[in-house]
Image: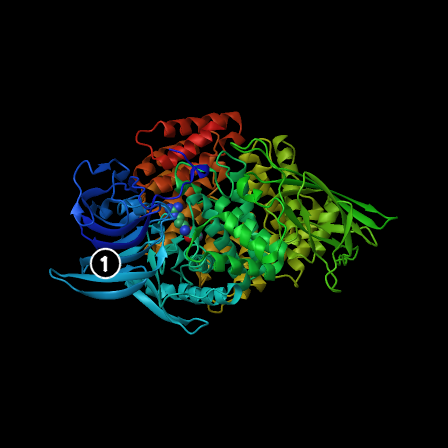
């Protein structure tokens, strides 16, 4: 059943207090709920519809008296009280659930001997009968009763107000959360856990107990998570003025978790791969991800919990904003430019592709069948870009005024994206023109820019034209409001001061209180629009969309020479990287044409020179160099083709990498040598950047057929003292089939078989390999003793990893599609959310040639016709077929 934003209605009843009581058992768990109910309109006496899925109803009472058949109606998804009393009343239900059999990992389930919950988006209905929607906000208490030896630790939201022993080896804990919350923020954890304890004193002097809970053997690996948490708490005070609001903050790590983590009030639950780290077992990328996600969930306390969403269509209100906040947190911690490059690459690779396919949806979707399918890169990452645009338009101070007003107006409320927009606008008295269409229109805008210099008038003109491509359900689009941060470079590569701009027949001054201005934000709001810079002394090279100021595809008329000039000179480091990427994309596309014509592949010497200059520029950040010498991914190039050709793109990327490695061998060897270190592992920006550069160079070198280098990489593998270096060397060796590869993969497994997080890396490295015919190997790994279809991380590593190799997943014999088709059907029976994430790999099937189209389509049709298919998989598969 499809649900529409336009059908939103206020609830007929509100819930004020909720007292839950859990009796956790091995056979069954009993949940008692006591809810105080208030009708929205007094005396309306409409039926009260409660959601409930996979629940066994034991009893239901109103104001203390048991309801009989006829007083209520029960179906597979609801409990409906047909004629509740008018006025306030107390509703009591008792239900029975089976967490130990719950493989969907939503609601209450068991993971490695622990009970835990995941309620967002609509999992609370698998725990008890409730109005499972975020605009129902209530104060909760939660009493947990369980066997004391099996479950010594009992946790829920808020403060622990009572605990004690009971008969029969049991004990209990009673928790009270003083803040009103929607049910998706409810959490419960019970199990044999231990905690790393620390404290944080807030800006107003509140001493907060911090606890990170894991099985005892994992405790040593929580040091970095604790560091990250404290850094996040401090940062939110400094940058957003947000202070923590309780005396306790808990984080629990669980190995079985569908997503990354969950921001339950004062009891965040994390996928263990986003908490646990040690230098020996986690890479720099893992450390960085942990910092970002610990920050993300913590930041939700204000953006999500204190101010929440009215309905699930508003998801980006909390997720886009919170992703923006975690991006800024990570930027301030490390390198802003490098963080931006990483975030933009993610957007281009995943979100642009989604925006151009059958699942394209606006940042605020208009409809859904299963909300879980809308925890997407569009809602999260594009949503964060939308928030970033407010900041670009308002400046840091104006943006902060906007968030201050937002918290002041809406604390304790469930609100909409317009409420956020209105706070930004009102706090700054700003004119946001048609900005709201970023929430309602799907598709990536395409913006063309034509530039011209008038030497007599000393003016420089930029003419913009924009189009927003059609997407499912939205054939025609309105123009968008696109902020284009722009600077002009003179012939020495220096920024020119900007004075004034003719726009809409008016001359607008750019200058700001006598200070020279080098970057200005052009507000492009129409289909076609011209901006003319006045007093431009010489023909400039424009630096457009600095810092990637809007989530668009920009096509400028810059020549290759202009781009090489920007790569070498732009003061905006992001745009230096961008210029290199545009050049690389052009180069790759031109060689794809050669490949398809069976012509020889060639590498432009000017490109090699540009890369060499970047490598040798010692003024640059090392991580920036590593990013700047990395070619765009295969997906990005396929996206730009009429018909995606994975074989051609793969061959070309491989060719350019190898050619670069051979022409820049000495420079790359120097990078490896200069950036090695035998010092103890430190996670800070300088060391991380150094390792990134060394390992990027190593990866290039390993593409050569060269005994000496094989020896060097093997040496790196053997002498590595941390996972970052060890895994990079392993990946470098694993590029090529052969005995060296087999041996080192076997050695790695032997070393790390006791550590499931490291074993997952080992799965992913093999499954995502581009080695011809790799599907056979992946089938074998499915029956490896360490694999388990019930654990999402293992599925993402092995099956998700496989789909990340275009040559193998899109193999022309259809073997990759068949593999995924079979697995989706199997997985769906265990865990629909995970199955649905996997089936998404099919969604761009129309982008390929006819042979591939037919093979992929056959799998999608097989999936859609499978018996007992979940709504999750049905939604993605059927929408994919419908295009
Ligand atoms: N709110 C969580 C986060 O962004 C994600 C939870 C998603 N859960 C789901 N079943 N889709 O941190
Ligand atoms: Zn989030």
Name the residue located 22 percent from the left edge and 54 percent from the top edge.
22
**x, y percentage for residue 639?**
57, 37
Say whether residue 69 is visible.
yes
Please give the name of the residue rendered at 68% of the width and 56% of the height, measured from the top-left corner.
Answer: 613
Residue under numbered circle 1: 143
Query: SS of the residue at dot 1?
Result: strand
Q: Nearer the viewer, residue 611 or 17?
A: 17
Above or below residue 559? Residue 747 is: below
Which of these two is toward me, 733 or 113?
A: 113
Location of residue 467 with respect to 455 vertically, above or below? above
Q: Split into 4 quadrants, where in the image is the N terminus?
A: top left
Q: Is residue 97 left or right of residue 254?
A: left
Residue 690 placement, left or right of 562: left
Return the residue nearer the eye: 667 or 30.
30
Q: Residue furthest left?
A: 168
Residue at the (73%, 64%) spot, across then down: 513
Give how far across and how far down residue 280 sits, in percent: 41, 62
Residue 706 in view in this figure:
no
Residue 89 versus residue 688: which sits nearer the camera?
89
Residue 726 percent coordinates (x, y): 45, 58
Q: Residues within 10 Å of mark 1 (few under 14, many from 20)?
A: many
């Amino acid at each position: 059943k499809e649900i529409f934003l336009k059908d939103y209605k206020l609830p007929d009843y509100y819930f004020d207090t909720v007292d839950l009581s859990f009796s956790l058992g091995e056979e069954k768990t009993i949940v008692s709920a006591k809810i105080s109910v208030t009708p929205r309109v007094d005396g309306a006496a409409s039926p009260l519809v409660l959601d409930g899925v996979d629940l066994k109803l034991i009893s239901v009472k109103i104001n203390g008296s048991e309801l009989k058949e006829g007083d209520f109606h029960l179906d597979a998804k609801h409990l409906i009280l047909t004629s509740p009393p008018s006025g306030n009343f107390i509703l009591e239900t008792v239900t029975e659930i089976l967490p130990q059999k719950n493989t969907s990992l939503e609601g209450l389930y068991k993971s490695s001997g622990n009970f835990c919950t995941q309620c967002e988006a609509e999992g609370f209905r698998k725990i008890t009968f409730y109005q499972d929607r975020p605009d129902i906000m209530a104060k909760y208490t939660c009493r947990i009763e369980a066997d004391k030896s099996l479950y010594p630790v009992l946790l829920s939201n808020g403060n622990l107000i009572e605990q004690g022993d009971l008969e029969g080896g049991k004990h209990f804990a009673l928790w009270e959360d003083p803040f009103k919350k929607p049910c998706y923020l409810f959490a419960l954890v019970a199990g044999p856990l231990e905690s790393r304890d620390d404290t944080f004193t807030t800006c107003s002097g509140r001493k907060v107990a911090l606890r990170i809970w894991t099985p005892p053997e994992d405790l040593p690996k929580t040091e970095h998570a604790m560091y990250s948490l404290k850094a996040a708490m401090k940062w939110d005070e400094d940058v957003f003025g947000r202070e923590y609001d309780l005396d306790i903050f808990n984080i629990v790590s669980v190995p079985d978790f569908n997503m990354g983590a969950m921001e339950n009030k004062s009891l965040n639950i994390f996928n263990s791969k986003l908490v646990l780290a040690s230098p020996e077992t986690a890479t720099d990328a893992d450390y960085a991800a942990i910092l970002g996600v610990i920050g993300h969930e913590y930041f939700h306390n204000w953006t999500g919990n204190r101010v929440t969403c009215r309905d699930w269509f508003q998801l980006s209100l909390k997720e886009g904003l919170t992703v923006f906040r975690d991006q800024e947190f990570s930027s301030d911690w490390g390198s802003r430019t490098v963080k931006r490059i990483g975030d933009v690459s993610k957007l281009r690779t995943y979100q642009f592709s989604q925006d151009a396919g059958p699942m394209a949806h606006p940042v605020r979707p208009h409809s859904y069948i299963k909300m879980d399918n809308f925890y997407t890169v569009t809602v999260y990452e594009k949503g964060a870009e939308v928030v970033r645009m407010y900041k670009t338009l308002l400046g840091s101070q104006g943006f902060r005024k906007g968030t201050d007003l937002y918290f002041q107006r809406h604390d304790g409320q469930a609100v909409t994206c317009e409420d956020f927009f209105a706070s930004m606008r009102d706090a700054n008295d700003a004119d946001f023109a048609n900005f709201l269409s970023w929430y309602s229109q799907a598709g990536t805008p395409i913006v063309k820019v034509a530039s011209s210099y008038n030497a007599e008038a000393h003016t420089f003109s930029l003419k913009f034209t924009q189009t927003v491509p059609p997407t499912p359900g939205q054939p025609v689009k309105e123009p968008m409001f696109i902020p284009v941060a722009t600077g002009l470079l003179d012939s020495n590569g220096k920024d020119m001061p900007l004075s004034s701009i003719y726009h809409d027949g008016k001359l607008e001054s750019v200058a700001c209180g006598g200070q020279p201005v080098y970057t200005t934000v052009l507000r492009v709001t129409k289909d076609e629009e011209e901006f003319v810079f006045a007093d431009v002394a010489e023909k400039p090279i424009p630096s457009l969309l600095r810092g990637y100021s809007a989530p668009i595809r920009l096509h400028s008329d810059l020549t290759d020479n202009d781009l090489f000039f920007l790569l070498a000179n732009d003061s905006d480091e992001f745009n230096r990287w961008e210029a290199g990427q545009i050049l690389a994309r052009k180069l790759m596309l031109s060689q794809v044409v050669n490949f398809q014509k069976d012509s020889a592949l060639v590498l432009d010497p000017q490109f090699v020179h540009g890369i060499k200059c970047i490598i040798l520029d010692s003024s640059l950040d090392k991580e920036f160099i590593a990013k700047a010498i990395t070619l765009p991914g295969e997906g990005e190039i396929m996206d730009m083709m009429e018909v995606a050709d994975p074989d051609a793109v793969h061959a070309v990327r491989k060719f350019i990498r190898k050619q670069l490695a051979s022409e820049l061998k000495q420079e790359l060897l120097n990078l490896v040598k200069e950036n090695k270190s035998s010092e103890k592992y430190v996670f800070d920006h300088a060391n991380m950047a150094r390792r990134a550069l060394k390992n990027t160079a190593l990866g290039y070198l390993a593409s050569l057929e060269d005994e000496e280098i094989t020896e060097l990489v093997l040496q790196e593998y053997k002498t590595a003292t941390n996972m970052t270096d060890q895994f990079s060397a392993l990946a470098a060796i694993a590029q090529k089939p052969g005995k060296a590869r087999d041996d080192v993969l076997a050695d790695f497994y032997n070393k790390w078989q006791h550590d499931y997080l490291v074993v997952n890396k080992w799965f992913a490295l093999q499954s995502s390999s581009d080695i011809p015919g790799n599907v056979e190997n992946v089938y074998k790994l499915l029956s490896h003793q360490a694999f388990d279809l019930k654990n999402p991380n293992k599925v993402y590593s092995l099956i998700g990893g496989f789909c990340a190799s275009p040559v193998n997943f899109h193999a022309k014999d259809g073997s990759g599609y068949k593999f995924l088709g079979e697995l989706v059907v199997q997985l769906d029976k265990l865990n629909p959310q995970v199955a649905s994430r996997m089936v998404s790999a099919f969604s761009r099937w129309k982008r390929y040639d006819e042979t591939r189209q037919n093979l992929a389509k056959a799998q999608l049709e097989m999936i859609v016709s499978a018996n007992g298919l979940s709504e999750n998989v049905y939604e993605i598969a059927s929408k994919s077929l419908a295009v």
